[in-house]
Amino acid sequence: MREKGKVWTTPFSPWQAEPAHPRNKVLILFVEVCVKTLVELERQYPWEKPKQCPKCQGVRLWGHGYAEAYFDETGGRCVLLKRYRCPECGVVIRLRPQEYWRRIQARVATVSQCVVERLEKGRWPPGCNSARGRHWLRGLKRQVRMRLGMSYAERLVEGFSELVRLGVCAVGRAV
């Protein structure tokens, strides 16, 4: 029951656009992981804990469970990726294999091979899903236009290489 004369405040009121202190941010750290071993060992996989938080450099990181992910290499089986939480800034750190881009289930090398062959030879390589390839190609065109400018619009293979060199997901749809 509420006491008479007391004002109750909540940390997040429904009419605010967002909390005063946004704490639930997710950072992805790319680490060297053997995906096939990860499938076999599941939760027993020996994840290497980050030494510090990449956001605030805090050294106290807590285990924060696992997140499910799917990769082409696993044959449709779910993979559990380790998560950590920083109690200092509240960020959640998700570990992900370094040979995969964010939100892409295929390896970077596979994506590169499919897109580059399509651009150079005019056809998708055998074994490449053409619907997925078209999605990647649209993403590449968008990334090239937005990040590198129209001078690269006709040189998409060069643009792909430049985006990879810059550390950008070259086929991602989000800019």
Image (tube, rainbow, N blue to C red):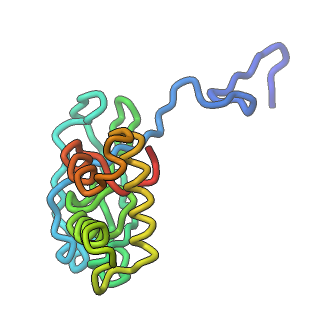
Q: Could one spot residue 55 in this view of the protein?
A: yes
**Count of all numbered marks drawn on residues in the image:** 0
Where does the image place residue 132, in percent across and percent down from the top left? Answer: 42, 72
Q: Is residue 171 left or right of residue 32?
A: right
Q: Quadrant of the C terminus?
A: top left
Q: Quadrant of the N terminus?
A: top right
Name the one closer to the observer, 46 or 155: 155
Residue at figure coordinates x 67%, y 27% from the top left: 10
Name the one closer to the observer, 10 or 67: 67
Quadrant housing residue 11 = top right
Where does the image place residue 126, in percent across and percent down from the top left? Answer: 28, 86
Q: Is residue 76 above or below residue 19?
A: below
Q: Is residue 110 above or below residue 67?
A: below
Where does the image place residue 127, in percent across and percent down from the top left? Answer: 30, 85
Q: Could one spot residue 44 in this view of the protein?
A: no
Residue at figure coordinates x 35%, y 29% from the top left: 88
- Residue closest to the far top: 5
Q: Is residue 141 above or below residue 26?
A: below
Where does the image place residue 9, in percent across and percent down from the top left? Answer: 70, 22
- Residue closest to the far right: 4
Residue at figure coordinates x 45%, y 66% from the top left: 135
Name the one closer to the observer, 55 or 166: 166
Quadrant housing residue 36 = bottom left
Quadrant housing residue 42 = bottom left
Name the one closer to the observer, 164 or 40: 164
Q: Is residue 112 above or below residue 59?
A: below
